[in-house]
Image: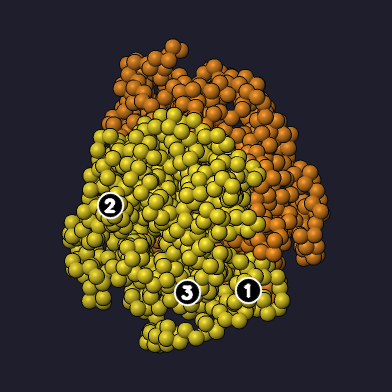
Chain colours: A yellow, B orange
């Protein structure tokens, strides 16, 4: 890469079409189709003062429009009239996230969660009965998993589905107030059916959480007998989505309403499952829903693209202060502080773009059946959890920084940042709370993706760690040796700033942090367990350490993906620019962790200062290309605010 | 202090009444009065779906109610029927910020900005004519300073006020679209008069920015001839405030409408001013408005108290996961990651509380005339800028973290966090953009508060720095010696965690950072200038460094204020608990900057790790007192959400 960076980014003439095409990647056509769709007059943004009943109605009509035009069939298997294009359907959803986020979420509920549950947890009979009507939105439905008392800990939901041998029916019941289904999209108004997650009780035995199709409303919109529905009320954002709460009072549904791919009960009441271990079964079921997390990661990415396109364009146009000799005022983006706030975020957006592209590819291979290895599926789940957490926090960062760097104008609804900021906010807690997702990633790292640790069970984990994890880590000799070799080549280098721009050095620093934090966490856990402390306390007191390990792992994966993205790029100028942006991503991440690197003797104080200096100079170098870099992200004009000669039009 | 910390915070029985009284401080009565007022049924929160015309009307009625009940007379001089209690009026405003923030802002516009401009920039004739009507809200008015093209750089506003010798009138004019007055509160709907900041043109000469009273609407609400008023439109938040834009087309007002305390024109057209230097005059005029910044700092502080009270109570009640042996689930606040997110913010809130208390005292002394030293006034302006920036960013942090740590429930309007989050957001950019305010602080540090550097003028600064600043810093021998002595006592200490909890050590680390960053910035600036680089480029390339210097200075002042607050506290248990909380503030701040401390050889890698460990253990120690600590903040129940047995009621 060294020869490429000899052309300074500042001097390049970037072909934004070539770069944009490259970013569009294998799903360019799908993306373009959706970008065009967003410009259709029927999808024009709502008035910001629209009241929520009207807004919900409008969003429902939008979802129907998408359904009628075949939006939802792209991802459906060919045997149900679909294209079987899972990757394309995620790319399409990602692009939809440039627009109204209530539409996005309602779409996700209907096709992704509700439809996905029927598809992945049901069998042929359910597919035949429901899929076509779901895709056309003739059957609006809900995905009723979360409960008031169990948002993150789904394995402990309180709702029960008890098999009644006499009538061959399931009796769905909400035992206490805190077991009500909560936050359920499509429930307050439009859903006619819900996929309800409940403990399957058969005789004396609880076979764990399974999913059931439960009608909740008739065609006239009246709640079915035994079903109580509440509106969740006004929210910070996403008020075009009708979230509700569901209570079931001994509601009966036929035996066949159990989505029985991973567990079924015969007429005579015998339970069987292709997966014996109940924890493994639960996580296999939940694992089929991974597409939702991948999709939300993509949505977070798109939102960050909108925010940065807005803020960077504004920063290029808006002028304030400047040389006093009567000269013109200076564009905000020429100020170092402004560059510092926006350009590392832009680099991270590109980095996440390439990571997301790989994640979608992984998803596509696993769900198309091309990749059947169990390990690949687990790795996908871990990746999805990690990228979702990082991408949605990143979206919130970009919106906040975008808002602030646009000053008062960013606070106006007309900036497009206001509503998005309120809407995207929930991304950090839905489809898995981000902190809980990081713990999931950590658990995978600690256990090597072993299925028996599906549940976040400190006691089980404790035993495992006490006996195996340390050895397993120490035994990773192949990785170790490789890493050691790289390191040996790099460490003797003189402490000149230039080394910092070597990708091998950056990658090695990331990998070293990942490995070292993880090993430290394991040692800390093991020490606590060896001293006979309560497993829960051991895990809790190492929680910050464990979360850092997860984050370090995700960061490494992101840098590796970005680097591969640079290397794959065939357009020379684009590649050179991406290469420099990748430096910015790597060094600004190292800068953020420079306290840690120094603590662990991995970078000296001199080199640490050099990191800061380099981030400054790359920002300066990238600055003239900032406009081209956001243009290549291809956020369609129809979702962007108006700009005047002095930045955002007020 | 060492003897106090021997009683571990975890074991204390805290007297929350004593602690609360201590926090209420000298304005306890004023605060209590406002806390009670917030519970009045007339001030009950609006429906979140209220449309903005209704919301604006409601807020206007609220402001009138406050005015009629004498809210605004507390701060007025006794000769105009007021109490002359400036500190009390700021404390009252701070407490009002627990409630609806549209009300707060509209109140601030009417009494603080509009009334404040008349009071401080006008003379007896204006006071007699306007003050009573402003206080009773019979005359709603605006403060028309910002322009579309000049948000932060007020000295360059484009609006002109040209003296017409023939008619003895001022002609107020908006030369171009971008010179329109923008974001003006009270302008879109209710304001009848505006204090307009414009370049005073007399004959051939421009005497710089002055303020003029300009009627903009008649009693019937119609715009006056030559005045064009636009509604700014829907915003992210604060939609109860009618922000507007004002354009003036050769609008004529009588000569006496110039607020002439700092500059006047005789009938015959002779300009005179008590302050000869125009830059100094401008900054003196603007300086009188410092109360606005102090008030917004207090408002930010109150908002952070609401957010943390909500999130910490929720964290104490809400349970998720936990030991697998069938035990009860664990309250969120028992998780280390949760403590880590909330408790350092709580410590910072307390720290800012004590800093704000000192700032209000400073303001009161300067504006009551008790303190007449020019240096004291400049120091107040710098302090206000710094505390405003830090307190409002802190408010945004607390709302974001509060929202996230309450999970989905924090996203509901009923949590009270949603609307506040949208409203308080603008605090970071209004009454001075925070980044610009930090530059103001930096400038004061670099020039030793010398008035000639009022304007952020790189060229003038450059000359000064080249010749004097370095020497001035080096000459600060008194400070140096004191610091050196403290340091010498501390550095030979063994690297045991215990030292970290010595206040002297913490203070020394803060002071060292402040001094070192500032010296580094000066050296960097001087080197650039000595090499003949363009002054603007020199300043720009050191901007990150200069901003860090400002932040380090503010941080030190905050820690010092907290420490004094601990020392002054007479209730033993409260003092011991505050002492520990002060440790948490100090160490979590040092932790955030540990990369820097290591780079500069001030803490070793071993000690840096000890800082992290100590933050963890103080969090654990403080955790059982978290409920008492938020109770003592006295956020009234009427502005808090409902709580159920499992946290926030949904």
Q: Residues within 10 Å of mark 3 (few under 14, many from 20)?
A: many
- Mark 2 vs mark 1: tell me if same chain: yes
Q: What residue is at 71 percent from the left and 50 percent from the top? A: B627
> Could you tell me if the residues under marks 2 and 1 are in contact, i.e. CB atoms within 8 Å?
no
Query: How many marks on residues?
Result: 3
- Which badge, 3 or 1, is on the more N-terminal residue? 1
| Residue at the spot of label 2 | A82
Q: Which quadrant, please, contains the N terminus of chain A?
A: bottom left
Question: Can the viewer see residue B153?
Answer: no
The chain letter for the residue carrying disc 1 is A
Between A157 and B49, which is closer to the camera in this rendering? A157
Can residue A349 be seen from the camera position used here?
yes
At a point 39% along the width and 40% down the height, the residue shown is A139
Residue marked by disc 1: A462
A356 left or right of A196?
A: left
Query: Nearer the observer, disc 3 or disc 1?
Result: 1
């Amino acid at each position: 890469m060294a020869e490429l960076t000899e052309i300074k980014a500042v001097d390049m003439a970037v072909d934004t079409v070539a770069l944009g095409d490259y970013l569009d990647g294998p799903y360019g056509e799908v993306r373009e189709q959706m970008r065009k769709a967003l410009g259709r007059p029927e999808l024009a943004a709502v008035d910001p003062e629209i009241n929520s009943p009207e807004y919900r109605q409008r969003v429902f009509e939008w979802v129907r429009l998408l359904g009628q035009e075949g939006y939802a069939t792209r991802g459906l298997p060919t045997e149900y009239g679909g294209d079987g294009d899972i990757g394309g359907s995620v790319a399409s959803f990602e692009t939809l996230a440039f627009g109204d986020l209530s539409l996005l979420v309602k779409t996700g509920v209907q096709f992704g969660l509700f439809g996905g549950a029927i598809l992945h947890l049901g069998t042929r009979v359910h597919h035949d009965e429901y899929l076509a009507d779901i895709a056309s939105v003739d059957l609006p439905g809900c995905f009723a998993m979360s409960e008031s008392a169990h948002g993150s800990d789904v394995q402990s939901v309180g709702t029960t589905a008890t098999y009644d041998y006499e009538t061959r029916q399931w009796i769905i019941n909400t035992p206490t107030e805190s077991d009500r289904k909560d936050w359920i999209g499509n429930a307050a108004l439009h859903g006619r059916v819900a996929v309800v997650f409940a403990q399957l009780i058969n005789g004396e035995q609880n076979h764990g959480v399974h999913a059931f199709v439960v009608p909740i409303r008739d065609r006239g919109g009246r709640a079915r007998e035994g079903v109580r529905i509440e509106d969740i009320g006004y929210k910070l954002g996403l008020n075009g989505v009708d979230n509700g709460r569901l209570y079931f009072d001994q509601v009966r549904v036929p035996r066949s309403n159990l989505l029985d791919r991973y567990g079924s009960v015969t007429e005579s009441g015998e339970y069987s499952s292709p997966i014996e271990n109940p924890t493994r079964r639960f996580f296999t079921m939940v694992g089929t829903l991974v597409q939702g997390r991948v999709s939300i990661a993509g949505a977070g990415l798109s939102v960050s693209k909108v925010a940065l396109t807005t803020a960077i364009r504004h920063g290029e146009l808006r002028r304030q202060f400047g040389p006093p000799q009567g000269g013109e005022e200076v564009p905000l983006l020429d100020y170092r502080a402004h560059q510092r706030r926006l350009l590392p975020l832009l680099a991270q957006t590109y980095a996440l773009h390439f990571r997301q592209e790989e994640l979608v590819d992984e998803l596509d291979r696993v769900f198309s059946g091309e990749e059947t290895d169990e390990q690949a599926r687990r790795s996908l789940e871990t990746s999805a959890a990690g990228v979702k957490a990082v991408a949605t926090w990143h979206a919130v960062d970009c919106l906040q920084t975008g808002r602030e760097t646009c000053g008062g104008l960013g606070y106006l609804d007309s900036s497009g940042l206001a509503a998005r900021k309120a809407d995207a906010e929930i991304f950090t807690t839905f489809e898995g709370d981000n902190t809980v997702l990081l713990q999931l990633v950590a658990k995978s790292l600690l256990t090597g993706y072993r299925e028996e640790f599906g549940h976040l069970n400190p006691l089980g984990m404790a035993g495992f760690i006490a006996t195996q994890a340390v050895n397993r880590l120490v035994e990773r000799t192949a990785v170790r040796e490789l890493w050691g070799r790289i390191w040996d080549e790099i460490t003797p280098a003189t402490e000149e700033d230039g080394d910092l721009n070597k990708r091998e050095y950056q990658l090695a620093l990331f990998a070293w942090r990942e490995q070292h934090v993880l090993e430290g966490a394991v040692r800390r856990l093991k020490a606590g367990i060896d001293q006979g402390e309560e497993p829960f306390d051991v895990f809790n007191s190492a929680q910050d350490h464990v979360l850092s390990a997860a984050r370090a792992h995700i960061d490494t994966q992101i840098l590796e993906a970005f680097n591969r993205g640079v290397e794959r790029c065939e357009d020379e100028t684009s590649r050179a620019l991406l290469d420099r942006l990748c430096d910015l991503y790597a060094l600004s991440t190292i800068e953020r962790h420079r306290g840690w690197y120094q603590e662990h003797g991995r970078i000296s104080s001199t080199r640490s200062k050099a990191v800061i200096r380099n981030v400054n100079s790359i920002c300066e170098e990238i600055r003239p290309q900032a406009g081209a870099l956001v243009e290549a992200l291809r956020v369609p004009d129809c979702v962007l605010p108006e700009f005047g000669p002095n930045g955002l039009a007020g």
